[in-house]
Amino acid sequence: MKIPFLNYDLRISKRGVNVLDEDGQLIGLADWMNGFSYTRTTPIMEQIYSTIANEFAKLDFRHVLFDKKTYTVQKTNLNYALSIRPNPLQSAHDFKYTIAYQLLKYGNFVAYIVRDEKGHPVELNPIDVADYEMGCGYKTDEDTIWIKFKNKRKNKIELIEYSNIIHLRLNPNDIFRGDKCSSLNNSKVIIDIMDASLNSLLRELKDSGSVRGIVTLGNSTAGGGFSGALSNNTNKTAKQAEIISRIKSTKGGILVLDQGESWTSLSTPFKTISTNEINEYIDYLYAFSGINSKIIDGTAGYEEMEVFFNKIIVPIIERFISEGQYKFFDRKAIETGHRVEYYRNPFEYIPIDKAVNIAYKGAMDTTTNERRRMIYKMPPIDGGDELMSNKNFERLKEKNKDDKD
């Protein structure tokens, strides 16, 4: 069984599962596992990527055919791949999640298009773009365009026929200089700086502490020294641990001090790291990613979610549809009306009372069963698939005819 994501083969035998690389050489399981990429960003960025990817994954993509009057969803392998199962290892939801996640995190998304004998798409297999440098150059051969990718894991340049992959770029200018253009993306640079700074603060937070009081040892002398003072840092650390142990074991909140020790309480505890610093960096990351904390925790209102959808989700949709339109269909199919369209639940972000009001006013646009599914999450009913008429939207020519009569 071929694993398109990692360019490996799995060979199943009576003795177990053998893993072979793309050259047919047997490799160990540990080496195979090293082919997976691990995240190196802060949990905040992972949360941002995941939130956006999950919203994108809610969309429904379809292969449709437009004619002069209507459009119909096509019963093709492409439509099955877009809406049900793009490849053996992913559901449609997981595939759409991968599109948004990799595009946002790595700046690119790439998926191989598997075609049948007639050249029609039947599968979409994404690769782990973290292992590649994209857009290292192009090579043309008559009508064929080959793009050069550098496999960083193998330090090897690979030529891929460009018409057989879906390639989305977060920065369209990457086409001129490849991944080197990422250094020109100011937003990405700032996000990386903020993310690295936040990552440092989070590491520091693990070992941080707060000072609520100070214990003074020994008495000051005329010469400026301290009689009975501890001689080195090791002794001071040991003494500190001993005092903390005494504080934790106090009964009734009473701390007994030794001779020569004095306690000074701080009205405002001194902390080695401020939570305000962390929150500021988190807010910066949200702002530069086009998102806010309410969208993250699910408390954002309708207006906020619509702005988020139009600013963040729609550009990813447009990238995927425009790229897929060209790669899935030939020119004749496009001219005859074949399209990739997306659909969303129009009531996704609207409170149910407002959704019911809007659906009632637009009853001629949706059937009873469509409203039951999108608003109430209820099963269909018999006779619920017909559109309702609305006298407020009669055709003008029919109204004029009635007036003349």
Image (spheres, rainbow, N blue to C red):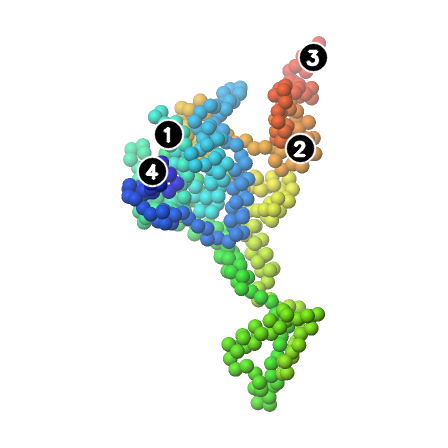
| Image position of 250 (left or right of 96) | right
Q: Earlier in the sequence, mark 2 or mark 3?
A: 2
From the viewer's perspective, tell me whether residue 326 is left or right of residue 197.
left
- The mark found on residue 14 in the picture is 4
Decide which of tag 3 and tag 1 comes sooner along the chain. Answer: 1
Which residue lies at the image location 52% right of the left edge and 52% below the top edge? 43
Q: Which residue is mark 1?
A: 115
Q: Is residue 46 visible?
A: yes
The residue mark sitting in front, 2 or 3, is 2
Residue in the foreground of this view, choosing between 45 and 29: 29
Q: Secondary structure at mark 3?
A: helix
Label number found at residue 355: 2
Q: Earlier in the sequence, mark 4 or mark 1?
A: 4
Task: Establish if 130 lies above or below 92.
Answer: below
Amino acid residing under circle 1: Arg
Badge 2 element: helix
Which part of the image, by quadrant, shows the N terminus? top left
Residue 398 in the image, given as x and y percentages of width and height = 65, 14
Q: Measured from the top left, where is residue 73 in percent x and y?
A: 50, 24
The amino acid at mark 2 is Ala
Quarter of the figure with residue 176: top left
